[in-house]
Every structure is written in C-alpha cells, then in structure tokens.
Image: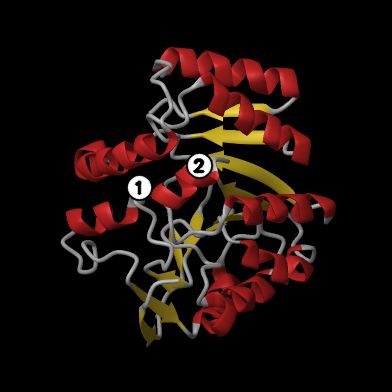
Amino acid sequence: MRRLQIQEIRCKHLLHRTGAPFAEFTLNPYVGCGFGCSYCYVPVLRAQRRQDGAEDWGSWVQVKVNAPDVVRREMLSVPRDARILIGSATDAWQPLEKRYRVSRGVLYELSFYPNPVTILTRSPLLLRDIDLLRRLVRVTVHLSLPTVDERARRIFEPHAPAVAGRLELTRRLLQAGIHTTWAWCPFLPGVENTAEHIRQYVQTAAQLGVREIWVGRMNYWGFIGASYQQLLRHYREQTRQPARWLGREQVRQLVQAECAQAGIACRISSG
C-alpha cells in the first residue's frame, strides 16, 4: 500500500439523504480512499465542487473516528424501512479499516435495526465482519469487480485488492448466506469489450454462484479520458492482444446472452 496521509476527524453527521433510486441514505466512515483507482468518480466530483484533494486522490484519507457514536444517535430518527448504502464515496473496508475498525462499529450499530443495508466494496477485509453481516435483517454486498483479468487490475487499480482476493470474498460470503452481487463497473473500454473477456467474466461469476451482475459504463470520460488512454496503451503493450473490440450494442447483447445462459440476472446501465 502507498504511503498515506492520515487525519483523524470527528463528524457531526454520518447518514446523508440521497435521491438515488437504490437508497434513502448513504453512509461513508472515511473521506478519501487508499485504493485510489484510476477511474474513480469521487475526485472528479471533488474537483467540480472545488474541494481539496482531487489531484492527489489516493494519497490521503480522513478517518471519522466517532462514526459508530454518530450513527447510533442518528438511527433513532431514521425510518425503519429506509435503505442505507455504505460506501458511495469511499471503500469502507479499505486497509485503514483493519486498524480503525470504524466500519465494523457502524455495522454493529446498524445490526440493532431492520433497515435494508447495501455495502459497496472491493475489499476482502469484509470477511472479518461476516458475524455482523449475519445479524443484519436484510443485507446485500455489492462487490466491485471491473475485471477478472489480474493484468488489467494491476494497471487500472494497482492499489486495490487482487482479483483472487475478491473471488474468495465472493465465495465466502455466498457460503455464509449473504446476498452478494457483482458490480461490473466501470466496464473498462478497450479491455472488457471483447467476447473473450465477457465470457470469462460471466463464467467466473457463474462458477462461484453469483446470481446477479450490474454493468455500468465509465463516468466522466471528459475528465479521466486522457489518463485512461495512457493506461490502456500500457495494457495493450503488455498483453499484445489483437483489436477485436465489440461495439456498445454488441456488448449489451453478448453480456445479456451469456448471463441468460448462465442463469444470472443482468442489469446494464443505460447511461
């Protein structure tokens, strides 16, 4: 892991209302993320809002050390059917969580309520907290996995967990009876849009027992396109793959066909 600038902070609020169709509240125990993936949309949003830390995203993290205490207080006024999403702007199980355990503390507090909880993460550290996941009435782990090609992972998200670790996380969560879906997003253009990659991804999911995949496009291309193209050239130099790229409609049709054949529900973003 890279050297991180770490700051411990105390937050006044942790639960934030959202107009998103999949949750009423978002919850982020950290500001910043040590994974610092090349395609992350959060630094783009910070730049648009003129917030600090966009250019050096991935090199700093603020830890909301009082997060469990704040969520304990705020949950008293949250409707019992309100859906809560953990990890909309950070990975709540990034490496610092092993030391600070604030996300585990938040899960413990949420376990006393019937609210549906969705966790968005790419971190095998979540395995540590399976005992608390089992206590939640309704929980879904949305596992971020843009590729099952470890070579691509090392180039586009070099500080994120290896593919093998995320596959093991999937296997263990499903064995524990935790509803687990895969987030194939962003769908890496120039990497994943080949028939070989699509079939490998869906077959890997099917072999593990995944029954739902969400596919999302790359966001904010105008902001990250130049740096992404540089990484893509590096990937192509390493893999020496011939250009057999599928168009958007071809991708959609093949993903849907492969998922249908494997018995996997597939949701493809129209954005």
Q: Place residue 229 in its image quadrant.
A: top left
Q: Which mark is residue 39?
A: 1
Instruction: Judge the density around disc 2: few (<14), some (14-19), many (≥20) Cα neighbours within 10 Å.
Output: many
- In whole angstroms, how far apart are the C-alphas of marks 1 and 2? 10 Å
Disc 2, SS: loop
Q: Residue at x 59, y 78 (%)?
A: 98
Q: Residue at x 46, y 29 (%)?
A: 269
**Percent position of residue 261, x then y:** 72, 18
Q: Amino acid at mark 1?
A: Tyr
241 or 62: nearer the viewer: 241
**Percent position of residue 110, x then y:** 66, 69
16 or 208: nearer the viewer: 208
Asked if residue 183 lies left or right of residue 36, the reply is right
Disc 1, SS: loop
Q: Quadrant of the N terminus?
A: bottom left
Please tell me whether residue 27 is drawn above or below residue 209 in the rendered image: below
Instruction: Judge the density around disc 1: few (<14), some (14-19), many (≥20) Cα neighbours within 10 Å.
Output: many
Q: Are marks 1 and 2 in contact (CB under 8 Å)?
A: yes
Asked if residue 111 lies left or right of residue 146, the reply is right
135 or 147: nearer the viewer: 147
Q: Considering only order in the chain, which callout, 2 or 1, is on the residue closer to the N terminus?
A: 1
Viewer can see residue 209: no
Q: Residue at x 53, y 49 (%)?
A: 23
Residue identifier under label 2: 146
Q: Quadrant of the C terminus?
A: top left
Asked if residue 8 lies left or right of residue 67, the reply is left
Q: Residue at x 52, y 72 (%)?
A: 95
**Percent position of residue 141, x then y:** 65, 52
Q: Place residue 235 in its image quadrant.
A: top left
Q: Place residue 270 in its image quadrant.
A: top left
Please tell me whether residue 52 is drawn above or below residue 219 in the rendered image: below
Q: Amino acid at mark 2?
A: Pro
